């Protein structure tokens, strides 16, 4: 296999696919009816990955990126990013024709991802909001609107869906924050004690709200209990402010593997 496939970082597709698959599962939709949406987001995930490399390749201290893009120019990375964006956008064409309201959510998602990758990733707090909305909330709304063909901009959500989206956002945020710690990104602008406090508050909130949601709606949400391994693992990694996992790429690898195992789990229950 060409070493260039490393540029795609396909191992990160789970961050995009899991929310889409869960939206399909919770609503009892047919995956085939949403295949263009799924494919579009998969290509856009590659766009986001390559945009990150396009931005980070100017940082000589980012050893992981430097190793991945070795031998490639910024122009070549940009072409790969643009190509995947065009392919993904083409797959959204017919869904948007069927429901014009999808244009708002799909365009807003694209804008948020571009802003995050190129400009707002270092801005603490804003980057978390952008990731939560673009990776959790809007993809869920898009699946709802794509199947229901509603003539309203905002899809109708059941109470358990509000609880699920809130829980999922906090669980994902917990994982993303520890990812920032490992990569020395935005949160590392704070001192170790502040980082630890934020990690614990977010992770404990994720656990509490998730358990409360599962107790309230066991029929719909009980199967997602295994996802609690993410905030529990994050709390363990941040158990000491002197031993935060900065530059611990092996821990990040375990997190990626865990994410892909969760993706496999969701695919199994979906079928």
Image (cartoon, rainbow, N blue to C red):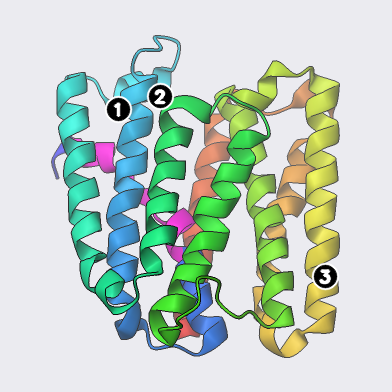
Q: CA distance from mark 3 to mark 1?
A: 39 Å
Front tag of 3 and 1: 3
Q: Does any portion of residue 239 appear in the rendered image?
A: no
Give the residue number, with chain letter if any, for mark 2: 64
In this rendering, position of residue 220 left or right of residue 89: right
Q: Pinpoint residue 10: horizontal percent, then vertical percent.
A: 33, 50
Q: Secondary structure at mark 3?
A: helix
Q: Quadrant of residue 236?
A: top right
The stretch drawn in magenta includes residue 6: yes
Give the residue number, with chain letter if any, for mark 3: 211
In this rendering, position of residue 80 left or right of residue 237: left
Which residue is drawn at the image coordinates 68% and 26% (left, top)? 187
Q: Residue furthest top?
A: 60
As drawn, 120 above or below 161 = above
As drawn, 240 above or below 139 = above
Q: CA distance from mark 2 to mark 3?
A: 36 Å
Placement of the N terminus among the 4 image quadrants:
top left
Magenta span: chief secondary structure:
helix
The magenta-colored residue range is 4-17
Q: How many marks?
A: 3
Give the residue number, with chain letter if any, for mark 1: 68
Mark 1 touches mark 2? (CB < 8 Å)? yes
Q: Secondary structure at mark 2?
A: helix
Front tag of 2 and 3: 3
């Amino acid at each position: 296999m060409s070493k260039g496939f490393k540029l795609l970082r396909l191992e990160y597709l789970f961050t995009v696919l899991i929310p889409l698959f869960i939206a399909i599962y919770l609503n009892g939709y047919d995956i085939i009816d949403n295949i263009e949406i799924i494919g579009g987001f998969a290509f856009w995930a590659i766009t986001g990955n390559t945009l990150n490399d396009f931005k980070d390749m100017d940082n000589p201290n980012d050893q992981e990126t430097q190793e991945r893009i070795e031998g490639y120019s910024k122009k070549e990375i940009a072409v790969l990013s643009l190509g995947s964006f065009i392919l993904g956008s083409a797959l959204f064409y017919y869904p948007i024709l069927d429901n014009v309201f999808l244009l708002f959510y799909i365009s807003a998602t694209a804008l948020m991802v571009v802003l995050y990758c190129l400009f707002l990733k270092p801005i603490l707090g804003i980057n978390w909001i952008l990731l939560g909305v673009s990776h959790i909330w809007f993809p869920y709304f898009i699946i709802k609107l794509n199947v229901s063909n509603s003539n309203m901009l905002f899809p109708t959500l059941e109470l358990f869906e509000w609880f699920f989206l809130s829980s999922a956002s906090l669980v994902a945020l917990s994982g993303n924050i520890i990812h920032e710690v490992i990569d020395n990104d935005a949160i590392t602008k704070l001192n170790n004690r502040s980082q630890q406090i934020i990690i614990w508050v977010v992770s404990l909130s994720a656990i509490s709200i998730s358990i409360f949601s599962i107790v309230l709606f066991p029929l719909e949400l009980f199967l997602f209990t295994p996802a609690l391994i993410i905030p529990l693992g994050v709390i363990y990694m941040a158990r000491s402010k002197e031993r935060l996992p900065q530059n611990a790429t092996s821990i990040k690898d375990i997190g990626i593997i865990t994410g892909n195992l969760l993706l496999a789990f969701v695919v199994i229950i979906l079928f």
